[in-house]
Image (cartoon, rainbow, N blue to C red):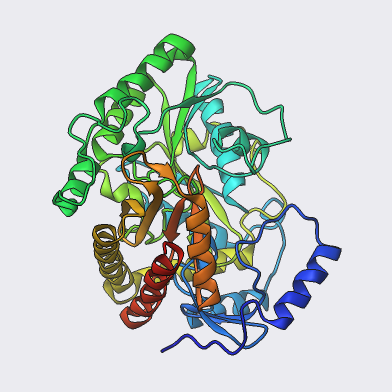
Amino acid sequence: MSIEIKTQIPGPKSISLMEERKKHVARGPFHTTPIFIEKAHGAHVWDVDGNKLLDFASGIGVVNVGHTPKELVEAITEQAGKNIHSSINVLAYEGYVRLSEKINNAIPGDFHKKSFLCNSGAEAVENAIKIARSFTKRQAVIAFDHAYHGRTYMAMSLTSKVNFYKHGFAPFNSEVYRAPFPYQYRCPSCSGSCENTPSINQSSDTKNDLNSRFEAKCEPCFSQFAHMVNSQIGAQNVAAVIVEPVLGEGGFLPVPKGYMKELRKFCTDNGILLILDEIQSGFGRTGKMFAVDHYDIVPDLMTLAKGLGGGMPIAAVAGRADVMDAPPEGGIGGTYCGNPVACAAGLAVFDMFEKDNGKLLEHSEKIGKLIHDKFLFWMETYNCIGDVRGIGPMQAMEFVKDRNTKEPDKELTGKIAKYCYENGVVTITAGTFGNVMRLLVPLVITEEELMEGLNVIEKAIQFASK
């Protein structure tokens, strides 16, 4: 057993620090657990009370290569001893160029690509929209239901969920339009019954059903998207469509492959840029370097962050060179953009994925299958699980009060998450209705550690659903 519980969780030191936090820190930042940590390594964190927990959240999908890997720490330390900051706008440095080159070579597309480095996912989204508008000379931008793109104003305008991301912060940016997402379990266009999209139930061949769902075109959903664009906006006015290939905060919903191909064709036919937000789904999270690698399409632009820096704050917009070069010199930038220490971290992350002929991605696929199979078994066993979904190790369960009505069970989901951290496994919830448990395990986790954590989650489901 790798989990070591020495006190109740939260322990006395965590409780004391939380009281201090309430005195000195603005109340706005949320906490999914009441735990303060002292150190972290691999798939584990140690709290200030000496408890050792398994981390199935990865800093919200950031430490894909694990906490404090030797290669990353050494790269950060070495660069910090040379140059912590000079601002790329004043004194340039090689790391920015080399990391941009790595990104350009890694993303799909048989054309010249360029990258812009910034500090956070939200900043990447903001700049992607600026670049798209500059290139197309159009204003309208389309996002989707259940989407999350960040907390700055354009990113927040693109984000769907009101509470707690948007409430009280209006007015939002104009010329942002929202299309229905092909949420196959709760299909907005056809009551959960898209063409060629089977529903999941205990008597079906669940694994084959899930494969069919991913391949589906979801024709009614796409028709509604196209009608909205043509009748309410005018395709000629749309600069970009931005979509997460797998929704993050929205509940780990993959865009069906057939739908994604139709979306790519629609954008191409109408001179609209397709932006894939891979901030949470990138860097091995779906078993491939990027989620787009599952789709056989090429976006015009991609936004990257989270796993790119392995824990250091860095993000990127990358894609077609002609599009990326649309803003004039000085049109995009920022004091800290592409910080040299963060660039060194990003290069180390790429090195870790390239090491040993891509064994990290191979391991990611393997643990993804283990999680997926376990979730399927649980869904056959526990009626409170209405749906399971995801790609690779980016997997989620949706909890419901009743499988027939599909009424979301947010309270049960919260109880499960609480039981988990109290018993040594850090998890996080998601979904528009707050009823989804998503797994974001470090991709370096061992099979033994993974199964240990999954056993705790199953006990949590049993405990909470009594």
Asked which quadrant contains residue 405, the reply is top left
Residue 387 appears at what percent x and percent y?
32, 49
67 lies left or right of 354: right
Question: Looking at the image, can residue 105 be seen?
Answer: no
Q: Is residue 461 above or below residue 247?
A: below
Q: Residue at x 61, y 66 (%)?
A: 33
Residue 413 appears at what percent x and percent y?
48, 57
137 lies left or right of 203: right
Q: How many marks?
A: 0
Identify the image quadrant of the N terminus.
bottom left
Q: Residue at x 48, y 20 (%)?
A: 238
Asked which quadrant contains residue 196, the reply is top left
Question: Which one is in front, 108 or 51?
Answer: 51
82 lies left or right of 210: right
Question: Which one is in front, 296 or 357?
Answer: 296
Q: Is residue 216 above or below residue 342?
A: above
Asked which quadrant contains residue 126, the reply is top right
Question: Which one is in front, 66 or 410?
Answer: 410
Question: Looking at the image, can residue 123 be seen?
Answer: yes
394 lies left or right of 47: left
Residue 131 appears at what percent x and percent y?
55, 33
Q: Residue at x 56, y 38 (%)?
A: 161
Identify the image quadrant of the C terminus.
bottom left
Q: Residue at x 24, y 43 (%)?
A: 214
Extreme residue toward the top, this view: 231
Extreme residue toward the front, this view: 466
